[in-house]
Amino acid sequence: MNCYLCGSKIPQAIRQTRRRVQTGDRFVRRNGRISNRKFTFGMRVVCSACARRMDRKRDADQLIRNLGAIGLLVLLALLLSFN
């Protein structure tokens, strides 16, 4: 079996890791113009290196979202405290 993302061979002895990956995309047209892009996702087998990279990216994205939310709450608290 090969990794869906990088194509490296995954030995049968190693436990297979499955992750949700983008499997395709398409453009949606309305009135002859492209209005938006739709992505399709599916569960695919990936190697351990790609799984680690995907996990790190997911964790970093979550951290950025959390810090943004905390920043907005702090800003809101500061604005309310000065009124």
Image: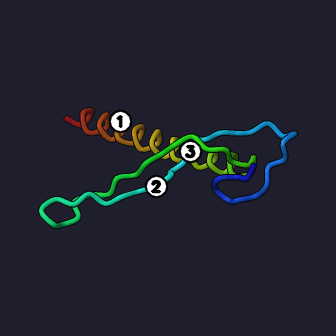
* In this view, the mark in front (1 or 3): 3
Neighbor class of circle 3 (other Cα within 10 Å; few <14, some 14-19, many 20+) is few
Find residue 68 and report its horizontal and vertical position in percent: 41, 44
Residue kind at label 1, given as amino acid type: Leu
Q: Which mark is residue 83?
A: none
Front: mark 3 or 2: 2
Q: Residues within 10 Å of mark 2 (few under 14, many from 20)?
A: few
* Dot placed on the residue nearer the N-terminal end, 2 or 1: 2
Q: Amino acid at mark 3?
A: Arg
Return the residue at label 3. Answer: 58
N-terminal of the pair, mark 1 or mark 3, is: 3
Which residue is found at the position 50% from the left and 52% from the top? 23
Q: According to the image, label 1 marks what residue? A: 73
Inter-mark Cα distance, 1 to 3: 23 Å
Residue at 87 percent across and 39 percent down: it is 13
Residue 5: % across, % down: 64, 56
